[in-house]
Image: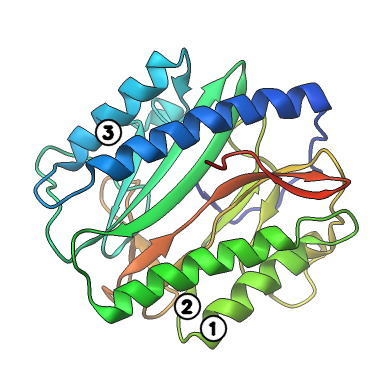
C-alpha cells in the first residue's frame, strides 16, 4: 500500500530473525498472489477476489494487513484500468475482457508485514496496455537491482524513472514506496523519481533495511486525484495505470526479495 509523500525519519534496521519472520509473511503473500492469478478472468467481481485473498491469508494463520488500516474495508486494493492505487473491491465491479487489473496486498504474520502488488491483463489487451505492464514490471526489477549496501534511495528512484520515461510513460509523483516491518508504513520513503537534491534521496542503504518498492506508472500524464471515497486514486487524464511492488531487504550480498514466489 503506497503512501502520500511526507518527510520521514530514519529507517529501522532488522535483525536476521526479523528478516526471516518477514520472509515467512512474504511466502504467504506469494501464495495468495498465485491463487489470485488463477482466479482473475473476465466476469469475476473484484469482491470475490478479495474474499479469495482473505481466505488464503487466514488459512495460513496470518492476517490481512490492509483490512481495518485507517478504516480501509478490504483485504486487497482493486486497481482497474485508470485506478492507480487503493481502489475498494466491490460485487458491482466486474472485470471485462481487455481491462488491466492491479492488486495491492499486505500480509501480517508474527507481528511483521509483507507488502506487494502486481498488474495483469484480463484476457486479451491492447498493445499499449501490454507495454505499460511490461515496462512497470521491468522498472521494479531495475530498482531492486540497486538495493545494495552503499547505494542510495536516489539510485532506486533514478532506475525507475529513467526506464519508465524512456518508454514514453509517466511516474506517479504524489505517492511513494516506504519502509516496512512491524508497521505497514515505516521510514524511509522510497520515491520512484528524482527531484532535485532532496536530502532523503541521499540516504545510504545498509544491511537490515526493509523497503516496499512500488513503481506506479501511468500511460498518460503523472497527475492523479483522490475519489470521493477518500481512498481510490485515479489518473487525472483517464489513462491506464500499472503498479508492481515487492518487499525487499538490504543484505551484505545484495537484495533479498521477501515477497518472491
Q: Nearer the viewer, mark 2 or mark 3?
A: 3
Q: Which residue is mark 3?
A: 50
Position of 22 relative to 121 (above/below): above
Q: Residue at point 45% right, 19% down?
A: 63
Where's residue 30, x and y in %?
48, 36
Residue at horizontal 14 percent and vertical 47 percent from the top: 93
Distance between mark 2 and mark 1 Cα atoms: 6 Å
Does label 2 or label 3 sit earlier along the sequence?
A: 3
Q: Which mark is residue 147?
A: none
- SS under mark 2: strand
Question: Residue 39 vs residue 97: left or right?
Answer: right
Secondary structure state at the residue bearing disc 1: helix
Is residue 106 visible from the viewing direction of this image? no
Q: Residues within 10 Å of mark 2 (few under 14, many from 20)?
A: many
User: Horizontal placement of 163 versus 116: left or right?
Assistant: right
Foreground: 248 or 83? 248
**Image position, residue 257 (x, y; %):** 65, 45
Instruction: In the rendered view, tell whether residue 164 sits above or below residue 57.
Output: below
Q: Which quadrant of the figure has residue 50?
A: top left
Bin the neighbour count of mark 1 within 10 Å (Cα to Cα): few under 14, some 14-19, many 20 and up: few
- The numbered dot on residue 165 is 1
**Residue 225 versus residue 50: which sits nearer the camera?**
50
Instruction: Name the residue beneath numbered marker 2.
Output: 170
Residue 109 in sight = yes
Residue located 53% across and 77% down the image: 164
Alpha carbon separation for disc pair 1 and 3: 33 Å
Q: Are marks 2 and 1 in contact (CB under 8 Å)?
A: yes
Amino acid at each position: 500500500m503506497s503512501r502520500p509523500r511526507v518527510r520521514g525519519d530514519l529507517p529501522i534496521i532488522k535483525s536476521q530473525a526479523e528478516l526471516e519472520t518477514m520472509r515467512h509473511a512474504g511466502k504467504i503473500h506469494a501464495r495468495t498472489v498465485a491463487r489470485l492469478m488463477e482466479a482473475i478472468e473476465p466476469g469475476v467481481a473484484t469482491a470475490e477476489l478479495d474474499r479469495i485473498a482473505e481466505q488464503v491469508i487466514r488459512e495460513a494463520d496470518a492476517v490481512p494487513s490492509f483490512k481495518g488500516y485507517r478504516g480501509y474495508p478490504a483485504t486487497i486494493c482493486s486497481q482497474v484500468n485508470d485506478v492507480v492505487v487503493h481502489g475498494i473491491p466491490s460485487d458491482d465491479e466486474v472485470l471485462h475482457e481487455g481491462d488491466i487489473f492491479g492488486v495491492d496486498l499486505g500480509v501480517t504474520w508474527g507481528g511483521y508485514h509483507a507488502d506487494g502488488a502486481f498488474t495483469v491483463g484480463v484476457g486479451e489487451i491492447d498493445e499499449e496496455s501490454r507495454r505499460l505492464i511490461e515496462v512497470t514490471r521491468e522498472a521494479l526489477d531495475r530498482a531492486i537491482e540497486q538495493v545494495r549496501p552503499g547505494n542510495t534511495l536516489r539510485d532506486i528512484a533514478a532506475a525507475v524513472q529513467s526506464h519508465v520515461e524512456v518508454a514514453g510513460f509517466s511516474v506517479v509523483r504524489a505517492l511513494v514506496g516506504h519502509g516496512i516491518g512491524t508497521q505497514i508504513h515505516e521510514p524511509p520513503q522510497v520515491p520512484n523519481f528524482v527531484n532535485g537534491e532532496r536530502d532523503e534521496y541521499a540516504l545510504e542503504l545498509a544491511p537490515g533495511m526493509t523497503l516496499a518498492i512500488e513503481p506506479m506508472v501511468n500511460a498518460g500524464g503523472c497527475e492523479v486525484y483522490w475519489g470521493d471515497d477518500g481512498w481510490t486514486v485515479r489518473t487525472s487524464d483517464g489513462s491506464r495505470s500499472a503498479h508492481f511492488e515487492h518487499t525487499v531487504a538490504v543484505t551484505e550480498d545484495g537484495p533479498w526479495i521477501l515477497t518472491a514466489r
